[in-house]
Amino acid sequence: NGKEALDMIKIKEPDLILSDINMPEMNGIEFCKQVKADPDCAAVPFVVMSSHSERSLVRGMIDQGATTYIVKPFNLEQLVVTIENLLSDSFLNLLKERERLNSERKMMLKSVIGIVMALEARHSYAEGHSKRVAKIVSGMAAVMKMDPDAIKMLEIAAKIHNLGYIAVPDKILLKPGKLTVEEYDVMKEHPVVGAEIIGANPALKDIVPALRSHHERYDGFGYPDGLKKEEPHLWARMIAVADTFDAITSIRPYRSAQSREYAIDTLNEIRGTQLCPKCVDAFLTWLETAPKKL
């Protein structure tokens, strides 16, 4: 019956729905209406099985969103042809939607990366930081034998991990001395802001955890959520290592750039407290063969 079918759909999204009109507890018209009201199932092809005397009811189901109908009695060949045609159309529509989302994602990424580059260009100490972080995590990912598609998304996350700085005033970003408690609270909002901006686009949802959690610490004393050990997404933990190394070896408003050797010693000191041990190890392995100038 229709109610049982709705329960099944919640467990597993169907490729196609074949429904009679007359069913106990919930008829086909109400079933179709509820299926099409669900955003997750609205695009699923819905086929109505009907008799000649039910034509007016069929029109009602078509109005509710049913895709087509097949008249009873029907033979197996008719049913197979109808289903094959619908699934073929559904597959083509899926490909078109995928192309649209990819195009939308590329356009948004181009704009977002441009914003981050512009932010860094305003602050000489930060120029090129995100590109270097992306290069580092790409090398770490190769050491960790990550999937090529995952590496591409990780690189994107690294390039825009500081997008949230758009909401931090220059007087805080460029302050040469120690931040006040209030200023530090403002600074700590940037991962949340960046994640919210990117999270508005469903095509980029996979990289949201990396943006939100790249300032979490292995010991749980990071921000914004106080996640610990391997609770933050792996990409966030990787970016944290790369971000820390580049910050140490780059000029900052309050100090000069430190040596690579000093940075390595620092990473080893905070391995297991601030930074994920597995990610630090992957970074150090990559660094052995990395160019001196990143």
Image (cartoon, rainbow, N blue to C red):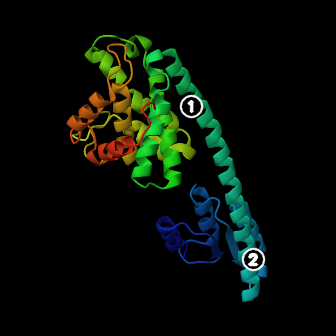
**Mark 1 residue crowding within 10 angstroms, few (<14) / some (14–19) / many (20+):** some
Q: Residue at x 30, y 46 (%)?
A: 281
The x and y percentages for residue 53 are 77, 80
Q: Is residue 265 above or below residue 54?
A: above
Residue 276's quadrant in the figure? top left
Residue 73 seen in render: no
Provide the secondary structure element on which disc 2 rests. helix
Q: Is 68 displayed left or right of 213 in the figure?
A: right
The x and y percentages for residue 103 are 67, 44
Q: Residue at x 50, y 32 (%)?
A: 131
Amino acid on which disc 1 is placed? Ile
Dot label at residue 92: none
Tell which of 227 and 261 is nearer to you.
261
Q: Is 73 displayed left or right of 257 in the figure?
A: right
**Mark 2 residue crowding within 10 angstroms, few (<14) / some (14–19) / many (20+):** some
Provide the secondary structure element on which disc 1 rests. helix
Q: Is residue 6 above or below residue 111?
A: below
Q: Is 95 displayed left or right of 294 in the figure?
A: right
Tell which of 77 and 52 is nearer to you.
77
Amino acid on which disc 2 is placed? Thr
Residue where numbered disc 2 is placed = 82
Q: Is residue 107 above or below residue 101?
A: above
The x and y percentages for residue 229 are 25, 46
Q: Residue at x 48, y 56 (%)?
A: 147
Q: Residue at x 57, y 31 (%)?
A: 112
Residue where numbered disc 1 is placed = 113
Q: Is 65 displayed left or right of 212 in the figure?
A: right
Q: Earlier in the sequence, mark 2 or mark 1?
A: 2
The x and y percentages for residue 94 are 67, 59
